Amino acid sequence: VLSVIAQQILTIQRASTQGLKRFLFEGTDLPLDASCAVFITMNPGYAGRSELPDNLKALFRPCAMMVPDYAMIGEISLMSYGFSEARPLARKIVQTYTLCSEQLSSQDHYDYGMRAVKSVLTAAGALKRKFPEDDENLLVLRSIKDVNLPKFLS
């Protein structure tokens, strides 16, 4: 599949390099927007991901990314859900997952990264909507439990 995509991207890049207004893409005549761009985001080494084939890698320039500030993302998300104690709660969520990644099994089906943090934030937001007057600490604790318990039991 990825080598087919490489050929398709190469066709688009060649048409763009030649300054064409229209080009033939897999038998279909298409207009070409000169401002179009193609980006690939990857997380190499992540469970279940495959490396890009060399012919696809050759079409792109690498760009290093920084690990995002999970606590800041969590704080903003919790604030948007109406949590008044968003900052300390976000830090607690991130610290929980940091400890999980350091101390628990590193099996592939355990994910303690941003995807897991986002799942907890979404669950906490749903609980906050359902129980707006409840203690925010307990809502976050419940969301951590609700999101993780099925993973630990399967």
Image (tube, grey):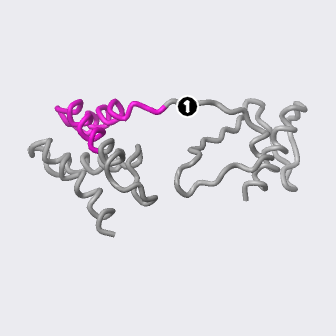
Q: Residue at x 68, y 33 (%)?
A: 62
Where's residue 50, x and y in %? 63, 54
Magenta residue span: 67-96
Question: Which element is circle 1 on?
Answer: loop
Q: Is residue 67 left or right of residue 50?
A: left
Q: Residue furthest bottom?
A: 154
Q: Residue at x 28, y 39 (%)?
A: 95
Dominant SS type (magenta): helix
Which quadrant is home to the C terminus? bottom left
Looking at the image, how many numbered discs can be counted on the residues? 1
- Where does residue 127 sit, x and y in percent of width and height? 20, 50
Which amino acid type is marked by label 1?
A: Met
Question: Is residue 109 found inside the magenta-colored segment of the image?
Answer: no
Q: Which residue is mark 1?
A: 65
Q: Nearer the viewer, residue 21 or 122?
A: 122
Q: Quadrant of residue 2?
A: bottom right
**Along the viewing direction, whichever of 94 and 25 lies nearer the viewer:** 94
Q: Is residue 72 magenta?
A: yes
Q: Percent position (x, y) of residue 37?
A: 71, 35
Q: Position of residue 18 (x, y in %)?
A: 90, 32
Kindly identify the residue that appears in the image at 84 percent across and 50 percent down.
Answer: 25
- Mark 1 crowd level (few <14, some 14–19, many ≥20, 10 Å Cα): few
Q: Residue at x 40, y 52 (%)?
A: 111
| Residue 92 figure quarter | top left
Quarter occupied by residue 32: top right
- Report the quarter where the N terminus lies: bottom right
> Measured along the vertical axis of the image, is residue 63 above or below residue 152?
above
Classify 110 as above or below 43.
below
